Image (tube, rainbow, N blue to C red):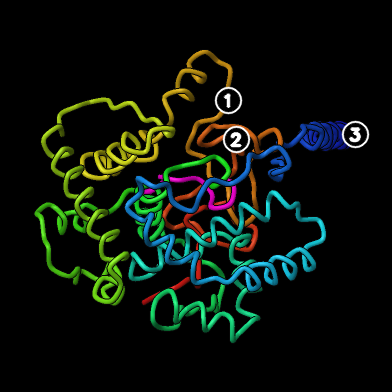
Amino acid sequence: MNVNIILLIIILVFAVLYFQSKKKRSVPQRKTKAPDFRNAPPPPPVAEEESPAFRLAGRMKQSIPKTYKQSVKQRVMGQHPGLSEREYEWRWLELQRFFVMCAVLDRVPMFSKAVDEVWHEMLMYTRDYQNFSDEYLGRMLHHAPNVSESVPMPGERAWFDLVYVELFGWSPYSELLWGPFFRHPIPRQELEHYRHPSLTAPEDGRFNTWAYDQIPEARAAIQAVRDGLQTRINMANEDRHQERRNVSFSNPEVLLASAVFFSWNDPEHFSDHMIPEEQIKRDMSGSSACSGTACSSGSDHSRDSDGGSGSDHNTSCNSNSSCSDGSSCSSGSSCSSCGGGGCSS
């Protein structure tokens, strides 16, 4: 073959490869927006009056003096000058809810960097924090350090979601801080423990036995969570042949029943089922490209929404995000099941 022809072929190949790579680079990449709490409503109470945690939340709030609360706020706002007053209010709300969950569950990993930042500043006032812990729980509420990179905790996150919604319901603004809810099923073998009623202290390692024995408000909340779980498991077992359930994130009871139902009957496709009915209708009409299974991060605040004021369960449409059980949790991870540190009894 003529040398000139070979050179011409090589030049053409390089030219084609060059223009293809240039075309790929020119394709705009989807960018996720940080949530903007400026248009967010004022935070609701830590727990509504009908919540099983209402009295426990009241005990927790009474354990934090106003002067201590104000000092923490001033310190956080000083450390984060770009933080809005409204976002701080939501962070403070979620930290208080986290403290309530620490009295209910045996261990609660921290799934939000934003909330953890407030907790860290609260710990700087060592004497005040010790007094708060003693008043609230009767012993120190320890902050377990995150000694390494966050790791995937799908099972722990599944329990976090279930108990959180049982006690506080669901809100799109809470999800901005914690990341997407109900991406992982509770293992069926763990649910088996709660099929039958029990009035004895929980000894399965999931609930806080210290608080159950020592704090009446915590005991009532724990028993209510267990009773509700037993009821939903029995319903899931009786209705196991049902093919479709509507999932409404605005109705906590429907949401909890759906989460238990699919954890019990179809855990392999759990995240596919746990999509709001409204989003399915939008997808079918072609108005949204989201699959509903992408993960955003509470720590990174990643959410593709307009100012964080949307009400969808999952509006992040990053085609590269993944939350498989084996996913890694780097500092830039977008997986809401990644956590570390937290509290334990």
Q: Could you say which disc has been placed on residue 147 in the image?
A: none
* Disc 2: CA contacts within 10 A as few (<14), some (14-19) or many (>=20): many
Span highlighted in magenta in the image: 176-184
Which residue in the protein does label 1 denote?
289
Please tell me which of labels 1 and 3 falls first in the chain: 3
Q: Nearer the viewer, residue 165 or 182?
A: 165
**Label 1 – label 3 distance at C-alpha:** 50 Å
Nearer mark to the viewer, of 2 and 3? 2
Please identify the residue farthest to the right as the structure is shown.
4
Q: Nearer the viewer, residue 122 or 111?
A: 122
Which residue in the protein does label 3 denote?
4
Where in the figure is residue 226, as x and y percent of width and height?
A: 22, 55
Please identify the residue farthest to the bottom as the structure is shown.
127
In the displayed structure, 43 sits above or below 29; it is below
Where in the figure is residue 268, as x and y percent of width and height?
A: 30, 43
The structure residue drawn at horizontal position 59% and vertical position 43%, both measured from the top left corner, is 320
Q: Are marks 1 and 2 in contact (CB under 8 Å)?
A: yes
**Which quadrant, please, contains the N terminus?**
top right
SS class of the residue under badge 1? loop
The disc labelled 2 sits on which kind of residue?
A: Cys
Where in the figure is residue 262, as x and y percent of width and height?
A: 27, 39
Nearer mark to the viewer, of 1 and 3? 1
